[in-house]
Amino acid sequence: MAVKKTDRDNVIDGALNLFRVKGYHHTSMSDISGACGLLKGSVYHYFPGKKDLAVAALDRVIEDVRAKLFIPANDDGRSPQERLRALADAVERYFIGREGGCVMGNLALEVGGGVPEFVERIRTYFEDWAKALTAILETRYETARAAELAEDAVARVQGAIMMMGLTGDEEILRRAGRDIVALLN
């Protein structure tokens, strides 16, 4: 049975979509309330301000990608090649067709180090991703080299997501995934 989303969940979902598409600074609380079909005052019932809402939204992304991307990557019941392929496939499913690309990548570029609460969460997101890749790549490479390759792979995927958003060409992300999987061939 599907779990019914609360108004608070809908506010977070609406904010995430707007932050991903419009950016943090170009999204107002009025935009968010309109996206969720609530009065502006109702949004303030759940979050005292936009920054608090953004923190909750970033926490939601971290939780979501840990479940959808990183848990399958850490499945010891699969071979390293299968785990890496599962991660690449999950990344494709997660980002292809997602308007605005990657909210974490977008906010990293938009706010830089300007909002410490965001930086901490954005760093956690990218570190989790690199750690998942490193754990798989360590089956073939020394730890330091596996970590370098993992960071490079995350950067490659983020660039591919950005280019996919600019060109509409999903093959850019798929090619990045194939090249990352090839690291274990």
Image (cartoon, grey):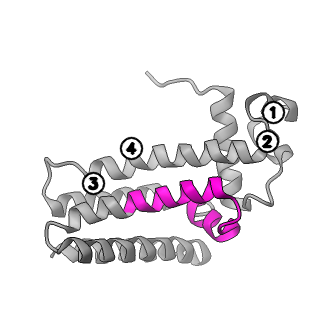
Alpha carbon distance from label 4 to label 1: 29 Å
**Helix, strand or loop: magenta stretch:** helix
The three-letter amino acid code for the residue at tag 4 is Ala
N-terminal of the pair, mark 1 or mark 3, is 1
Crowding around mark 2 (Cα neighbors within 10 Å: few <14, some 14 to 19, many 20+) is few
Crowding around mark 3 (Cα neighbors within 10 Å: few <14, some 14 to 19, many 20+) is many
Residue 177 in view (yes/no): yes
Magenta region includes residue 177: no
Of circles 3 and 2, which is in front? Answer: 2
Q: Name the residue under label 1.
A: 44
Horizontal side of 100 relative to 86 (left or right) equals right
Alpha carbon distance from label 4 to label 2: 28 Å
The three-letter amino acid code for the residue at tag 1 is Tyr
The region drawn magenta spans: 102-129
Kindly give the residue lying farthest to the top in the view shown: 1
Q: Name the residue under label 2.
A: 49
Q: Residue 73 carries which label?
A: 3
Q: Position of residue 167 (x, y in %)?
A: 58, 78
The three-letter amino acid code for the residue at tag 3 is Ala
Q: Name the residue under label 4.
A: 67
